[in-house]
Amino acid sequence: MGRMGSELNSFEMRQGTVAELFDSDPRGSFIMSGTAAVSLDPSQAAAEVRQEESTRRLSSKIGIDATRKHKYPPLALPPKEHLDRVREHWKEYGFRE
């Protein structure tokens, strides 16, 4: 793999990509401090720190509002004749009415 490929797979590169794509408007995110730590959290204490240490008990978590802020396109449905055919055979498919 070339130099660019290894850069794209680095942790820093992925973090940078997320940062660029995420709208940092404070109304779209929130941080909860003092929450229970998760052992997979890379910001937690080093692996050699005992589980009982206070640095392993609490952490922070971020919530991100990733919803669209604009009008959604209209709902896309199959053609009416397809829906009618499915309704006719509904019980054959094993579904209750």
Image (cartoon, rainbow, N blue to C red):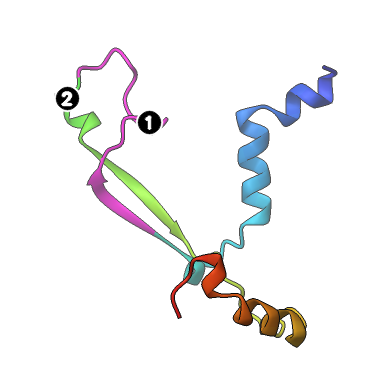
Instruction: Provide residue 15's location: percent of width, then percent of height.
Output: 60, 40
Residue 84 point in image, percent of width and height: 68, 85
What kind of element bears circle 1? Answer: loop
* Location of mark 2 (residue): 53
Q: Which residue is mark 1?
A: 40
Query: For the residue carrying disc 2, how many other residues have a C-alpha within 10 Å: few (<14), some (14-19), or many (20+)?
Result: few
Q: Nearer the viewer, residue 88 or 67?
A: 88
Secondary structure mostly seen in magenta is loop
Quick check: can you spot residue 91? yes
Q: Nearer the viewer, residue 36 or 96?
A: 96
| Label of residue 73 in the image | none
Is 73 situated left or right of 30 in this image? right
User: What residue type is disc 2 on?
Assistant: Glu
Q: Which residues are magenta?
A: 31-50
Q: Residue at x 68, y 52 (%)?
A: 20
- Residue type for callout 1: Leu
Tell me if mark 1 has few (under 14), some (14-19) or many (20+) residues whose alpha carbon lies within 10 angstroms of its own: few
Q: Circle 2 sits in a helix, a strand or a loop, which is it? A: loop
Q: Position of residue 60 (x, y in %)?
A: 33, 46
Q: Nearer the viewer, mark 1 or mark 2?
A: 1
Image quarter of residue 10: top right
Are the residues tagged 1 and 2 within 8 Å (C-beta)? Answer: no
Reply yes or no: does residue 53 show up in magenta.
no
First-in-chain label (1 vs 2): 1
Identify whether 83 is placed above or below 59.
below
Say above or below: 26 vs 79: above
